[in-house]
Image (cartoon, helix red, strand yellow):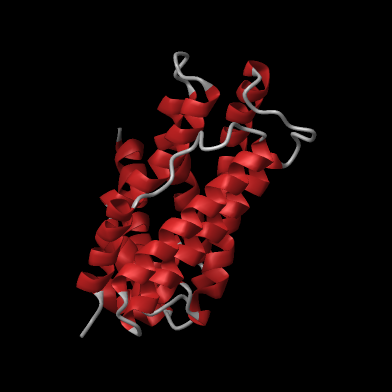
Amino acid sequence: MARIVKEHEYKKKRNEILDAAQRLIYTKGYERMTIGDILTDLQISSGAFYHYFKSKPAVLEGFIERIKEEVESPFLPILHDPHLSALEKLQGFFNTLDNLRLVRKTDVVELAHIWYDDSNAIVRQKVDEAVLKQRVPLLNEIIHQGIQEGIFKLAYSEHISEVILFLLQGMGTTHVKLLLSLTQEHDEQRCIERIVSVHAAYMDAIERVLGAPLNSLYRADTEAVRVWVKAIKDGTPN
């Protein structure tokens, strides 16, 4: 029993350090963050810190591992539903991504202002790689089901999941940069139209990659985009 309590306490304290590191990465960037910043944030000694992490890169490793644990579980109910077709699962996969962002909308907006800064280049690369590694097997299952159902017509099925995830990453980056452009230019309607157009173009590309029917995947409309425009404007410092 004592060992279980100790393990629980160890994990709790370790997560507190990772939470502090995450806050700092999201506000000042990984490169600018120091171990001293973490100590100040948590009001702990360096000895307490080094009991859990040997270095700043070790904190980054822990941060990435925690993200890997979190990115898979929300998709499993969709993946394991025997009543859903491959197209329904694929759309459910995309919807889950959107819902995860919406639930943490405030955090996403706050992160958007620092995520593409050079100070987070290492973190961004490692997070992208970790997410890709975790989600490729999930998409593989959906794609194989779609091939069996005859809805996806692929000449080459290998690596298609990676291609789709790279497309999603590219789309996400473009969307964020367009939304952040509102801090310089204030043509809100033009920004919304461009995001809707970009989303449609990427969904069209994904359908073509899969050999899926045209317009079988959802295209974002102006109302869906407007939610994010408002969030960005509300979350941008004056």
Q: Which quarter of the figure has residue 136?
A: top right
Residue 11 seen anywhere in this rendered image of the structure: yes
Residue at 42 percent of width and 67 percent of height: 176
Q: Nearer the viewer, residue 149 or 201?
A: 201
Q: Is residue 20 visible?
A: no
> In the picture shown, does residue 103 fall above or below 30?
above
Q: Which residue extends farthest top? A: 83
* Rendering quarter of residue 40: bottom left
Pick whichever, 79 or 25, lies toward us: 79
Task: Reply above or below: 181 against 22.
Answer: below
Where residue 102 appears, x then y in whole percent?
29, 51
Q: Residue furthest right?
A: 155
- Assign the C terminus to one quadrant of the image: bottom left
For residue 54, side relative to residue 182 (left or right): right
Image quadrant in which you'd find residue 121:
bottom right
Residue ID at (35%, 55%):
15
Spot occupied by residue 198 in the image (x, y as percentages of width and height): 50, 59
Would residue 204 be found to the left or right of residue 38 on screen?
right
Number of disc labels: 0
Which quadrant is home to the N terminus?
top left
User: How far across and down, in percent of the image, does residue 154 sit?
Assistant: 74, 32
Residue found 50% across the figure and 72% down from its top: 56
Residue 190: x and y, percent? 37, 70
- Report the front residue among 104 and 94: 94
The answer to whether 8 is drawn above or below residue 128 in the figure is above
Residue 162 located left or right of residue 59 = right
Which residue does the image show at 58% across and 62% down from the upper left? Answer: 126
Q: Return the residue nearer the eye: 210 or 31.
A: 210
